[in-house]
Amino acid sequence: MEAEEQNMDTGKKVNIGVVGLGYWGPNLVRNFIDVENCRVVMVCDANEARLKPVKKRYPNIELTTKYEDMAASNDVDAIAIATPVISHYPLAKQALENGKHVLIEKPICSNSTEAEDLIKTAKKYQKILMVDHTFLYTGGVRKIKELIDKGEIGQLFYLDSVRINLGLFRPDVNVIWDLASHDISIIHYLFDEPPVSVSAMGRDFNNNNITCLAYITLKYKSGMIAHIHTSWLSPVKIRRIILGGSKKMVIYDDVEPTEKIKIYDSGIEFRQENETSLQPTYRLGDINLPKLDQREALALEANHFIDCILNGKKPLTDGAMGLAVLKILEAADISTREGGREIALNISRQQ
Amino acid sequence: MEAEEQNMDTGKKVNIGVVGLGYWGPNLVRNFIDVENCRVVMVCDANEARLKPVKKRYPNIELTTKYEDMAASNDVDAIAIATPVISHYPLAKQALENGKHVLIEKPICSNSTEAEDLIKTAKKYQKILMVDHTFLYTGGVRKIKELIDKGEIGQLFYLDSVRINLGLFRPDVNVIWDLASHDISIIHYLFDEPPVSVSAMGRDFNNNNITCLAYITLKYKSGMIAHIHTSWLSPVKIRRIILGGSKKMVIYDDVEPTEKIKIYDSGIEFRQENETSLQPTYRLGDINLPKLDQREALALEANHFIDCILNGKKPLTDGAMGLAVLKILEAADISTREGGREIALNISRQQ
Amino acid sequence: MEAEEQNMDTGKKVNIGVVGLGYWGPNLVRNFIDVENCRVVMVCDANEARLKPVKKRYPNIELTTKYEDMAASNDVDAIAIATPVISHYPLAKQALENGKHVLIEKPICSNSTEAEDLIKTAKKYQKILMVDHTFLYTGGVRKIKELIDKGEIGQLFYLDSVRINLGLFRPDVNVIWDLASHDISIIHYLFDEPPVSVSAMGRDFNNNNITCLAYITLKYKSGMIAHIHTSWLSPVKIRRIILGGSKKMVIYDDVEPTEKIKIYDSGIEFRQENETSLQPTYRLGDINLPKLDQREALALEANHFIDCILNGKKPLTDGAMGLAVLKILEAADISTREGGREIALNISRQQ
Amino acid sequence: MEAEEQNMDTGKKVNIGVVGLGYWGPNLVRNFIDVENCRVVMVCDANEARLKPVKKRYPNIELTTKYEDMAASNDVDAIAIATPVISHYPLAKQALENGKHVLIEKPICSNSTEAEDLIKTAKKYQKILMVDHTFLYTGGVRKIKELIDKGEIGQLFYLDSVRINLGLFRPDVNVIWDLASHDISIIHYLFDEPPVSVSAMGRDFNNNNITCLAYITLKYKSGMIAHIHTSWLSPVKIRRIILGGSKKMVIYDDVEPTEKIKIYDSGIEFRQENETSLQPTYRLGDINLPKLDQREALALEANHFIDCILNGKKPLTDGAMGLAVLKILEAADISTREGGREIALNISRQQ
């Protein structure tokens, strides 16, 4: 990623349209407005009431309730899609076929067949296809990636994530797609190896068939294990990832305003007890809280998208990564329906 | 339980012996010394070095390295066993057969066959058999039990427990037997219904076959789910139980020095969206932190044991409860060996 | 205050101009744009570079580097001033004399003579003069006010505030004027009685004569004491007010994202020890965390300003309150220069 | 200090007596029992009921309600005094004159005349006189001392301590003598220079003339300032010292179970703005939490006392340090009575 680079001012500007003005769309509008070589020229929402506050804030942006207007507009170079998941595929397909670059809110599509088709379509039309896995642009996640890549963590034993709160029940997705998709994208970014299986225990609410609490386990060939606790039913908001390695351990607490990453110089070691046995023991040392890049992740991501368009770069969170995350989500859903059965995965690292 | 009652001073005293002076045994000594109608008359440890500090502190207590001395002593009415799990059965059996009341550190035995035999033996000799599930005597757990019994939580949806730290690797038991046994006893105490199945994902360390990290799921007929994350591999100590109900939610954070219990007047409700659908929604209200009984749990428990002996009462944590916990531990072990397979349980509530 | 009322749509709109686009000004712009009966029509900053981002975000707002343009514009009904303190008086005076309503960032002016003249001027021209003491519009402060007014706290013994961080050293004001002014406005709002004296210990940095750390004590006739620790030299950000009363105690921790207010059912009581002595003792009970209004304070305040203009209401944070705060700030400065000498205050409650 | 050294086993043993079995005395008993070359041979309390639990726990220790018995006993080499402050002087005087070494709970005496006499008496009889300023033996305080001495903090700007809780109102001392005496001893230990003045604002409770809340400021020749907020009227327990230096800043949070010390690589620097002005600015870097010595402070201190007796060493917390602390307490009391007037101090560093 070169999200941190300033876009070179080549004089070229990207005109962007944003479709979907629910919770996330207005954040996209605000962040793209601030990108140097970018203009937000149009927004779209089928619900006219959602266009009104945009009009009051930014009277110059063109408004429409018809997506066809945006997809067909010659004035629009790229489209950011922040609509319910079910509509991601048709909207993105239409945009790509009209020669627009596309950024899609996660998860990429409703199923992997759709995602594979979008990847093929983007390739055919030579357009950027990027998925909005925002967490990969945070200072915290990038710091952990850096520590792993430098070998400071040592051999990885486990990753444990808790991402729970009293939630907005979403009609379009369950809690795995809504919240655990963040963890799955983070895990996929951090680790070199893809998971070989997923199991998930979940429960819905009053038999409504929408999982609102789930425990997900990913297994890896190396023996590493990743576990995600995700829930819309928790009275408190917890966002905490623990990463255990042979050299160091890391805690990433995203609820902390500034001290998000703690690196523990602690680990598990072997002590030769006698001729035949190695006794595991532990070492407890200093704790370090590194200074993090405090810039807003979505701002970095918006810049990265425009940079990819203007300079022909490959997005960090491209269609292939979006597809890998989606395959895990699909398998987790199957596992919850089958009482936690372990589902084998077939994900290549390129994804 | 009537652990809170003062033992009536009937003039009778219980003479107690403590076997096993590792980590927990000295706590038993200290607490039993302070019980009104009780005298600690003898301690035993095969390792003579562990007897030395007892001698310096309490020169009047008789010391021995031979358990037979204690089991045979006419001066000893009851024995508290704080040795490695493997020895619980033979030591307790011998004590009961010599007419001593027995308190055993958790878990009760190495396997349920042993436990069943101890229960039978205690019945035959009409002696008290009690298991040291200390958490059931804490102000926090008793407050949650009270809330559930009063109906303040409403329908129970889930219990989520995290009990992790950078651990003392124990040679005699794995982390499930060491730490999760606390949660299993708490859950068993809190809920009226027994679990119908258990699944557990675990990992050992460097193929040493001792589980040091595990995720355990208990399922219930009512649809309730209980999940335990237990680990010796965490850089931080977390002791947190979240209980989600239809009326209220509770967090029990045992690391907090005083504010251990938070009761959230928050919950999930149904809103009739239209004729055919009920949309779950949530309510976020005040939070209450009740004042808790701050007395040391082990002190209450020691008093309760002496009270049961002197007044013929049934212990709150009797052999049957110890057996129920043990059956779940055994099934969890099988599940981890079989990659997380769901193991059916057959536990009657009396246990 | 009736900040919570929706402004009635009388058809009338207030056209507002914002002068000063440093840290706070852009927040004013953003919030006034969202007020129903208000339009932001002009912004002004002598530094042209600061106008550029406004132009990118809101191309329809008129820009100027000359304040005269704004003060003289017939299109402007009200002016919000967010410039360095030294310029508050001349800018506000000019605005009032041109028939504009005025909102001034705190503190109101550089000295109380200026503030008194502004109050007089506003009265003469019958315009609203309001000071931006934002904290008085937060859910947290309003909840404490409600508790005091209902008598739930009982007799007030002390208020202790800590407001410290590693600070932006400001060239125009010291840390007392910058940070402690928040506490002084909060205290003045909460308590019925005005303070009778102020003492302050401060230290500057390397003899630069700008206080960057201070301890301020306010005394009250009733015996109540208020103490403020304010600093730009703390490695951590703390925003915590403790209020001690005879019936209850309150902690307001503004760094907490949601659980800001804790009400302790704890207090000090008298126990008759013998005929002649009353022994103080304490009672420790439950803790309650009330649900708070989560709306953005500045949004409520912006609405309140427009409401006062349209409906002729008296602002909660009017010129008189701004003057009372300023008198305390002036006396605190004198006290720090004189090594902490107690300075008598003459503030009537109307202020 | 060489508190960490093991006492050399010279065969000699110190027989110690403990007088005063209120809150602190039993802790002294327990810790001295565990010291290698020490025996607790006698305890004394005028209240016979307090002797009973000692008898139950340690039947071999001689009990008395008459201090004369202890002071006169040939079997007693040293006496630890944990009685109300008013009695420190006569009890210690009698002990020294009978040729006993003395350890006195802080503060050393009721007034500095008494303390000076004790110092003289100890010198005359060549006995150890040590004051129980326990905090100076904690891993946290010793780590901060080490950081200062190594120059890692740089120039010291301020120390800010908050030591508050809902308190035990003590009849014999006010909150300054009870709680702030800890901070004063810590500050005196950490800094090379003695304070030149003290000012204190306090309030009593219902005119009972016992200060239960106080703000104390110590000034230093170097410009450094130390401030202590101490209270028995806080609903929460806070034990937090912030130390600000030119190179680093330190937070010592004694309520944290393990992560007590945080070292912030943050500080204040000068940036040359133009020819005539130096603008202070700040640097925000990593945070480090060093591993601390976790041993119980009182155990180290008890060992140190016995080591001083057996090997003729000078105690870290000797009579001179006790006197220096006491002089500051006396001046703080005067200042509170005079409304916060600054009181000059005359303390030589040897004290």
Image (cartoon, coloured by chain):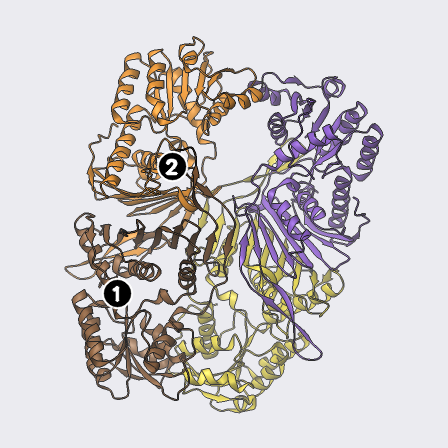
Chain colours: A brown, B orange, C yellow, D purple
Q: Confirm whether residue A335 shows in the render.
A: yes
Q: Is residue B324 left or right of residue D29?
A: left
Q: Quadrant of the C terminus of chain B?
A: top left
CA separation, marks 1 and 2? 47 Å
On the image, numbered disc 2 is attached to which residue? B141
Relative image position of residue C313 (x, y in whole percent): 49, 74
Residue at x 55% of width, y 23% of height: B53
Can you tell which quarter of the image residue C86 is in?
bottom right
Q: Is residue C292 above or below residue B189?
A: below
Q: Confirm whether residue D83 shows in the render.
A: no
Q: Is residue D94 left or right of residue B3?
A: right
Element marked by disc 2: helix
Residue at x 40% of width, y 31% of height: B134
Q: Quadrant of the N terminus of chain B?
A: top left
Amino acid at pointer 2: Val
Numbered disc 1: what chain?
A: A
Q: Is residue A101 above or below residue D207?
A: below
On the image, numbered disc 1 is attached to which residue? A351
Q: Nearer the viewer, residue A27 or C286?
A: A27
Q: Which mark is residue B289?
A: none
Residue at x 19% of width, y 81% of height: A97
Can you tell which quarter of the image residue A184 is in?
bottom left
